[in-house]
Amino acid sequence: MAEQIFYDHSSDLSHKAKWYAGRVAVYGILIFWTVVCLFPIYWTVTTSFKLAPNVMQGHMIPFVDFWPAWKGWDSLGLSPRLAGQESTVREEFLKRFTNSAITSVSASVLAVVLGSLAAYGLSRFRYKFGFMRNPDISFFFLSQLILPPVVLALPFLVLYRSLDLLDTRIGLILLYTLTVLPIVIWIMRDQFQSIPVELEEAALVDGLSIWQAFLTIVMPIALPGMVAAFILSLVLTWNEYFFAALLTSTDAKTLPVMVASQTGSQGINWWAMAALSTAAIVPLIIIGVVLERFIIKGMAAGAVK
Amino acid sequence: MSQGDLLHVVTGDDIGERRRFIGKALIWGSFAVVVAAFSWCALAQTGYLAWELANWRPALYAYLLWATCLCIAQVVLHGEQGKRTLFVLPATLFVVAMVIFPLIFALTLAFSNWNLSAFEGPRFNGFDNVRQMWTDPFYWNALKNMVYYTLAILVEYSIAFGLALIMASQIRARKFFRVAFLMPLMLSPVAVSWMVGKSMLEIRFGPISRLARWLGWDRPSFFGDPEIARLTIMIMDAWTFIPFMMIMLLAGLQAIPRDIQEAARVDGASGWRSFWEVTFPLMLPVSLTAILIRIIFKLKLADIIINVTSGGPGGATDSVTSFIFREYRDRSNVGYGTLLAIVYLVLIVVAITVFMKAVDRWMNPRY
Amino acid sequence: MKTSVYNYMKRAGKIQRRDVLKGLGATGTMAAFSGVATGAGVRPVWAASHDSLRADILKIPGVGMGSPTDPDWQKVGEMCLGPIKEVVSEGEFFGVELTFMGLNNQNLHNFLFRGFLKPWEAYTGATINWIDLAQADYNARLQQSIATGTVDFDIIEMGAPFEGDVLGRGMASVMPDWVMDVIDMDDYVGYLKAPVGTWDGKTYRISIDGDCHTFAYRTDYFGDGSVTGRDVPATWQEINEISMELKGKTDPLTGLDAHGYLDPLKGWGGFGFYFLENRAAAYAKHPNDPAWLFDPDTMKPRVNNPAWVQAIQDVLDLIEADAYPADQINADPGTTAFQQFLAGTGSMLMWWGDVGSNARTSDTSVVGDVVGFGINPASDRVYNAATGAWENTMNEAPNMAYIGWGVYVMATVDSDSKRQKAAWSAAAHLGGKDLSLWASAYPSGFQPYRNSHFNYDEWEEAGYDRAFIEDYLGSNADSYNHPNAAIEPRIPGIFQYYSVAEDELAKGFAGQYGSAQETADAIAAAWENITDQIGREQQIALYRASLGL
């Protein structure tokens, strides 16, 4: 540390002590918040291996407090015991899982494609649709974010019924695309704004068309941002409950609906509930761990002008 | 039209009469198909045609056709200029179809009396729903709660800012902490309400209740008292969304040029003063963006409330969405529920617009 | 039978004989009282030829052999197919496709139906598609289907409260006569007979379940030298006194604070209102009047009459006296039953048939061997809505909350006689007399609902403990066949009424209204709104029809 030369010996010591105290406080806060963030996940995962008495007695640490059991996972047909057997519950779970995967991925892809194009256009050109100019168009897109889901709930029910889109994955994909489109545009607009226009100008001078320039020059640079937008969309659509509960019943029902409906008049099976919750959150946790830097990049892109 | 384009290109499109005609023909021709398809479906629906109407898909396909033709026609009509329009047009057509039609439908619903259990279906009832809303204590109570919930964002913001500051400082294992802090955002609210709201807060065996007892709270009760119940909901919601704000703020902090902070330090500003005089003002735009987005998400708050408290005790935790959810789902009162939702939407739009204008005025003062 | 009872049976050895509150296990005796029902005094009907079949199916998989699984359901379905084979020839419905909508509760409901109907599909050549719904989504989905006209199912598993919505609109298919012969409707317990399941004199419902609220109490709280020092309360007045007296005392089992009766104070999507009804039934259900929620001539709510106000006042008094456990304001019915009563908090509870036995089977329960059952307690006075005055007579009125599940065939099949017959034969198979015995003896989600289910000899022979069966089933049988049973109005939107009442009650209990009367008036006003919205004339007509007036 270069500054040390400005301090004499004794104050240097006190400075050091202060520094250590500061470090302890900082790491204390960090570790405390890590526990706050991770404990619920730990609780969910361990509870899925508990039996009723473990839950009631508040046992926490597997192998120490309690011996893990597969009971919760049995109820999903996902335990070693049931691995080889045919299981209707597992089929049901996998069906919901597949539905969730297909709808969230498709909706996110669609949103990223539509949103990136729009965001690029808005960041590069001046438009005039009737009375609407660029800021108005941007606001038009972003304002969809404000729309509370309840406003669209029943109209969509009736609309989808007339279009025969109820309980179809297509219907859900379209709606999810709508809900995440503003976020994608938000992120991508800032992404494109941060790319210097000179790049494309040079390309255009070289004889590329605008679309060629967009696809070959701009897209590769903006790709991390697109991945980020995609992942954020994925998170939101994977977890979406309200519309899924409303618009699907059999064929297209998704995982969150299945989680929410695990209660009857017989009380709650915590272990089964925990197993299902775990299965529902694990894909996103993995994505979060592996692709964390993209997510952060995406949100950062939205934050810094 | 292209005046002021950021990407300025001179284009020399020569669009002849013939091309213009084809373009117009494309648009209006396909539009005629749309009109035909809609009227055909409408007629079939009302039974004027001897044709069984399975669904309105023909109208949907006609709209898709029109949308495609409209896009092609842009290029035909305007050449290079049209190709630029093509960037925005698909998204616009998509959003218009997905929002405008349902919204128009919602407006007609909002002014009708439609209880799903009534045999008659929707009946127009003018402003009856508005009058009912005016005297509905549940709705006003929910709106009041939304104000509390929104105010809680300031606390969330302070915590998120604090964490972001720490994360931006010299620490080890930053990546680990970043991943860990991100996790709550990835979890499904439904799973959170069950595993946190119901299981961890269970009064006897939940780990948080145990901790509370250990800390000296004899009879922990997280949802018994109205104030505490609302606070618990706020905390659960904050837990999910603090990572979001934190990451935005962290990005903002890292974007502040090092030399500005260095300069402040060289000037002898203490950490505290340099924060208030340098960092915080620089962070204002990011902060406002983060807060705005957070407000928008907060206004949709419902999943946790529906699953954990159903608005209780005595409506203390009700959010507008969770109240409308009950009105709509448990009481099948569709017309009234839709009106409440529309009014809510109007309130939100007004509030957000005012907020944004105020921020704009504040950030870019016009002399 | 509920899962828990079955689990309990498996451990039957542990149980000692318990006092049966009324000592009346004998169904026939009770059936003789059943004046409400059309077929009063019907003895359990027994077809001797079926005896061996019934004994045989009860051996699948056998008591103590673990929970039945798909092969078991299929085997039972196969063995019980006899009555269907008499009216349907093999392959008769080849090519017919039907859609069945029911509940997806884990290993209950639709899971069983699939197994039961597999042999039926194989025999008749028809195929069935399934719509599985969560219990919480059921009402909303049904209402949406009705309102948007998406009746995408041919057969539906439905509770009687929704009959007003569905039958009232003529959406269901009228039961053909041959089905009545197959399912032997005379065997139903009193309250499940007409008018339940009928509309305008026509029959629609095949019952597969019975529901009522019974009284569960902690035996260690009562008797000489107990913490209360009193006998098991027989009236709500006594229950209230005991609940007050218990304040500050100690639970004999857990050593924690003792509590009396547990009222759920939080809503449960409409289902929470049943629990106020339990109190109110004793005050408001006059033996001379089938109506107790509304005035059948005007649909004017009775919920703000002195009887109902008294019920609300009881709860408010107990809140005021701080007699409930902590956080009771956030306790929904599920919490009171499974997290309080079973865990040793509180000493009295009203619940569907299963909570008392669940107490002994569940590993989480600490109240194991100290639970007894009875019917809904009485009141020492009853309000007569006709005269507008209280009458000082003892009044008992069990609350037939939800009336149980039934199978209904939708009118969508009526245009095609082959489909119609196919749908009804599938429904009749599920509501068959022998099949239902198996369903009431093993985990299925359904409780006994036929007089023939209360033949304790059959249960004993199948390996069940007689003392328990008489104790548990006795309270159910007594309630089912009670002459003054409080039956739920089967009018459109009944759960809307319950749901709005829950919201207002929550405010009342939280002290946001000045008095019980104000709370009740708020509920009544909200109910009047709903009635006007749905259509008063129509509601009056349907209410009267549902009461059989």
Image (cartoon, rainbow, N blue to C red):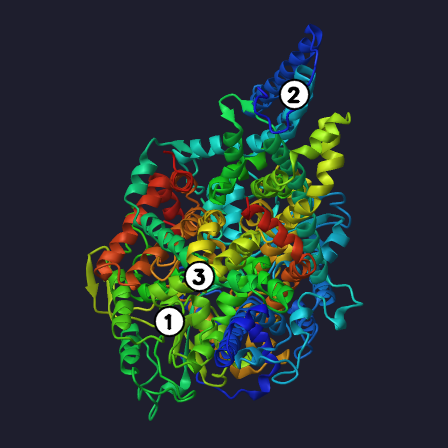
Mark 2 closeness class: few <14, some 14–19, many ≥20 residues within 10 Å? some
C-alpha separation, residue under disc 3 versus residue under disc 2: 54 Å
Mark number displayed over residue A223? none
Mark 1 to mark 3: distance in Å?
51 Å
Q: Is residue C225 left or right of residue B178?
A: left
The lab-note entry on whether marks 3 and 2 share a chain reads: yes
Residue occupying image coordinates x 35% and y 82%? C232
Q: Is residue C84 left or right of residue C504?
A: right
Q: Quadrant of residue B312?
A: bottom left
Viewer-side residue, C125 vs A77? A77
Tell me if label 3 and label 2 are in contact, CB under 8 Å: no
**For the residues carrying marks 1 and 3, which lies nearer the camera in this image?**
3
Measuring 60% from the left and 71% from the top, which residue is drawn there?
A: A42
Position of B235 with respect to C519 (left or right) is right
The residue where tag 2 is placed is: B81
Query: Which residue is the site of mark 1?
Result: C327
